[in-house]
Image: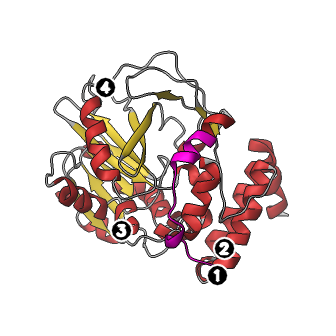
Amino acid sequence: MDMIKKAVEAIQEGGSKNLYRKICDYIDYHYKPAKNEWKTIDVVKSDMRQFAYWFGYRFDIYNPRTFTEKVHTYKLLYRDASMSEIVDKYTFKTFISKKLNSDQYVIPAYGVWDSIDAIESTWADLPSEFVLKSTISSDGNNIIFVSNKDKVSFDSIREDLKKCFLPKNTQLNGYSQAYYSLRPRVLAEQYVHELSGNDNLKDYKFYCFNGRVEFVYTTSRVFENKENPSEADYPRTFFDLDWNKIPVSLGNHPTSNYEEKPVHFQEMIEISKILSEGFPFVRIDFYDTIFSPLLGEMTFYPTGGTKPLKPDSFDKKMGDLFIIPPEKLIRI
């Protein structure tokens, strides 16, 4: 009866797709060990069933056409060992420092831990303000902002920290291969304020194809929905590299009427060219500060391929730029 009640509540909250998502979360949480040992062909078949559910059609995993389709091929069959280092938000910092031969664009870290007890034992050593985040979550999930440690009891964030270590947060449910070898940890890093001085922090996300930067979109109000930031109805506004707004959207997210060009926009583009070299596709995320841009993360599988670029013609155009070397795909 309890499961039926939860199913009804899920449908009331967000319809059948919300129920489907919760079922996937439940399976991933309770059956992670078995799922992690699936054969590649079974992983592909499962993801393709999900794709057909979301989009209403199937495609050949070895002959994708659109950007959205290619994200699925990329996350299921493409192999590059360096991708695991990059998607871990702690080891990512080392990768960036080496690649750019500088720490200038890296958000300073205060520590990384693999248990709540370890965090608690060093709590007193952390500065007054900082950010705690899962090293392997995405889309704004599992992030805790501490603006004044003296006003925060450790017990008050204990439940949120537990979520950072849940098995489902290894991205197994999204079949994202770069995450499969990683373990969830919690990272503490510097609290980054927006250029204007308030806390409505904006992301600048650059879509890059093997050293070519194609466009950027901004996000704001990401953390208004604390329970599930990735599902919040926050704006995503798209621009070309001359900062002209372009008529593109992602999933059902709205766009805003006006976004101010970041001060270090051109610098972000040049950094993105360097970091994206050698990868068929990667999204590179920045914050802008008074002194320089700071790198947030590099993402190979935006939204896990569940939210298409719109219109369809743009999804196809970006798919043409997303060239995945067939020799780097595993065969099933």
Image side of residue 99 versus residue 174, left or right: left
Q: Who comes first in sequence, dot 2 or dot 4?
A: 2
Q: Who comes first in sequence, dot 2 or dot 3?
A: 2
Q: Report the magenta residues as a range.
A: 316-332
Q: Quick check: marks 1 and 3 in contact, CB under 8 Å?
A: no
Instruction: State the separation of the CA atoms marked 4 and 1.
Output: 44 Å
Residue receiving disc 3: 82
> In percent of the image, x 28 and y 56: which residue is there?
188
Q: Who comes first in sequence, dot 1 or dot 3?
A: 1
Q: Position of residue 298 (x, y in %)?
A: 38, 52
Q: Say which amino acid is labelled 4.
A: Pro
Establish if 24 lies above or below 102. below
User: Which mark is on residue 38?
Assistant: 1
Mark 1 element type: loop
Q: Position of residue 14 (x, y in %)?
A: 75, 43
Within 10 Å of disc 1 (Cα), the crowding (few <14, some 14-19, many 20+) is few
Q: Position of residue 275 (x, y in %)?
A: 30, 52
Residue receiving disc 4: 262
Front position in the image: 268 or 133: 268
Mark 4 element type: loop
Q: Which picture quadrant has residue 167?
A: bottom right
Residue 220 located within the stretch drawn in magenta: no
Q: Who comes first in sequence, dot 4 or dot 1?
A: 1
Instruction: State the separation of the CA atoms marked 2 and 1.
Output: 6 Å
Q: Quick check: marks 2 and 4 in contact, CB under 8 Å?
A: no
Front position in the image: 118 or 42: 42
Residue 148 seen from this side: no
Q: Say which amino acid is labelled 2.
A: Val
